[in-house]
Image: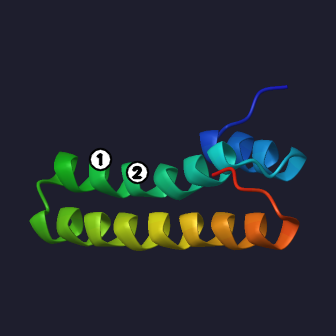
Amino acid sequence: MEFGFASVGAMLLYLRREAPANVLTLAVLPMCIFLLSGIMLRHWLLMGFSILFAVGQIYIAVSNITMSNEARGNDDI
């Protein structure tokens, strides 16, 4: 089965099994798309906000991982 968008495949990977690597991949994937768009368009404001978006998205993903691990009793990240 072939998908038209890589994000659809990543989402299916996340739905199969919620692993920390999958969650972080889905947090970084949109940032890479925004940053690449900003670089290709030479839009400095878009690049700046994509970095700001990345920091927030990764922070939320890591905090969700740690909260779910604390609820389950795991110490893995």
Q: In the structure shown, which secondary structural element does the residue marked by tag 1 occupy?
A: helix
For residue 47, what is the image quadrant? bottom left
Spatial distance from mark 2 to mark 1, Cα to Cα?
5 Å
Name above or below for residue 23 compared with residue 58. Answer: above
For residue 38, what is the image quadrant? bottom left
Which residue occupies the foreground of this view, 48 or 73?
A: 73
Say which residue appears at 40% left-offset and 57% top-offset: 31
1 with respect to 55 (left or right):
right
Which residue occupies the foreground of this view, 42 or 62?
A: 62
Residue 67 appears at what percent x and percent y? Answer: 70, 73
Residue 49 appears at what percent x and percent y? Answer: 26, 72
Q: Classify the position of the N terminus by image quarter.
A: top right
Say which residue appears at 63% left-offset and 43% top-offset: 21
33 with respect to 63 (left or right):
left
Q: Residues within 10 Å of mark 1 (few under 14, many from 20)?
A: some
Say which residue appears at 67% left-offset and 46% top-offset: 22
Which residue occupies the foreground of this view, 5 or 59?
A: 59
Name above or below for residue 15 compared with residue 72. Answer: above
Residue 72 appears at what percent x and percent y? Answer: 86, 65
Which color scheme does this rendered protein use?
A: rainbow
Q: In the structure shown, which secondary structural element does the residue marked by tag 2 occupy?
A: helix
State yes or no: discs 2 and 1 in contact (Cβ < 8 Å). yes
Name above or below for residue 17 compared with residue 74. Answer: above
Q: Residues within 10 Å of mark 2 (few under 14, many from 20)?
A: few
The residue labelled by disc 2 is 33
Amino acid at dot 2? Ile
The residue labelled by disc 1 is 36
Say which residue appears at 20% left-offset and 46% top-offset: 40
Amino acid at dot 1? Leu
